[in-house]
Amino acid sequence: MRGVLITDLRTPHVLVDRPRVFRNLARMQAAVKARGLALRPHAKTHKLAWLAQQQVAHGAVGVCCAKLGEAEALASAGASDILVPYPLNPVNAGRVVALQERVSLSFVIDDLDVARAWSAAMRDAGRRADVLVKIDVGFHRCGIDPSLVDPVPVIEAISALGGLRLRGLISHAGQCYHAHHDDELAQMARDERDLMVGIAERCRARGIAIDTISMGATPIARHSLALDGFTELRIGNYVYFDRTQVGLGAATWDDCALTVIAMVVSRPAPDRVILDCGSKTLSNDGARGFGQMPGFGALVPDMIDNTPDPSCTLERLSEEHATVRVSSRSALRIGDRVRVIPNHSCVVSNLVDEVAVVEGRDVVDVLPVTARGRIS
Ligand SMILES: Cc1ncc(COP(=O)(O)O)c(C=O)c1O
């Protein structure tokens, strides 16, 4: 796209800064390699065939997809090894069998009855499904909660079922997004590791093979990487980062690779500026962090430097408007362009059909968001 500048794009538009993305990929891959671990990035963050390929080219063993629809889209775009870290229901057996024809597929189970239903479905299809058992390590979403049920007998029963091949254990310490300080994050990483390794050791003592222990969440990745015992890091947001990751100490502003370029469309009061990016672009997600993180993103006045203007707060979003509180001395005028570092980059990717890949001020490509909206 010779000669196209980011300021030539219609606004709002999502920008993906290629040098920053490549730096994020290379840095994490090097850290994982130094620890002798496998990296299996979660493609839900970017949903782009191009970035899934880049992650594998950098050394990832495969990718994760949040749902079968995402996996189908990325398989069609060339992904060959996909883990769906989601408790798939056996009503999806036909889709799973069809995907197995195209890729090496694994998914998550956290319930013995569901495992039995999968076992029956796969035996009927003359197939075997690779599964990992999900353990609830404190997020209290999916997974076997060891404070309620001893996971080991359940894992043992699953490992004995025909039609299934138990690959190992999986966890996601999503509670880390609510940490108040770095020591708490470090403790969460240790607790997750201890719980997972303890369960794996008890399984192995019973003769159950646990090849994979897959853990991962970007805010605690730096702490998890200092620990032994697990085999696979499964992180997603690290490819782009966002305001929440800066708030949780996982990234600097300069690491944030996804931004939204927006235009000032109104300046109705000295202390108020209106941008053309609303909740349809940024989502209504708040930011998390160790301190207060008010507002719906960080306003960045420069087109290259990611330093936010601390005097601007995106205090309210309508669908197509961001209402920004500014200093009355702000020089922002109607027609000016700014960038926004969103609170949560993963949801922003899902809201747009295409992203502009940029280097500095230059647009080098415009790519369709391959798995956008594949929520089922
Ligand atoms: C099950 C599961 N694994 C891994 C991840 C990756 O987390 P993060 O984006 O914090 O790296 C997510 C993210 O939501 C997830 O739901």
Image: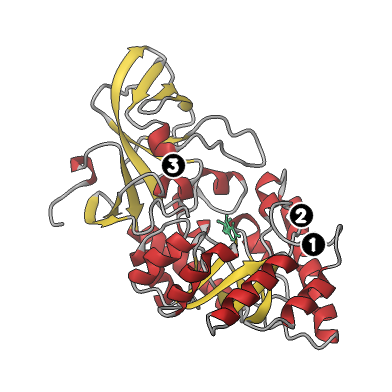
Quadrant for ligand 1 reads bottom right
Q: Which mark is residue 362?
A: none
| Residue shown at 85% from the left, 62% from the top | 149
- Badge 1: residue crowd in 10 Å (few <14, some 14–19, many ≥20): some
Q: CA distance from mark 2 to mark 3?
A: 29 Å
Residue assigned mark 2: 138
- Quadrant for the N terminus in the image: bottom left
Q: Earlier in the sequence, mark 1 or mark 2?
A: 2
Q: Is residue 254 visible?
A: yes
Residue assigned mark 1: 191
Horizontal placement of 336 versus 317: left or right?
A: left
Query: Is label 1 or label 2 in front?
Result: 2
Q: CA distance from mark 1 to mark 2?
A: 9 Å
Position of residue 106 measured from the top left corner of the image (x, y, whole percent): 56, 74
> What is the three-letter code of the residue carrying label 2?
Gly
Using the image as rendered, state which of residue 17 and residue 199 is in the foreground. 199
- Badge 2: residue crowd in 10 Å (few <14, some 14–19, many ≥20): many
| Residue shown at 65% from the left, 78% from the top | 231
> What is the three-letter code of the residue carrying label 1?
Asp
Q: CA distance from mark 3 to mark 1?
A: 31 Å
Q: Contact, CB < 8 Å: mark 1 with mark 2?
A: yes
- Residue extending farthest to the bottom is 207
Using the image as rendered, state which of residue 159 and residue 147 is in the foreground. 159
Q: Which mark is residue 341?
A: 3
Quadrant position of residue 163: bottom right
- Residue extending farthest to the top is 269
Colour convention: secondary structure
Secondary structure found at label 1: helix
> What is the three-letter code of the residue carrying label 3?
Ile
Position of residue 316 measured from the top left corner of the image (x, y, whole percent): 47, 24
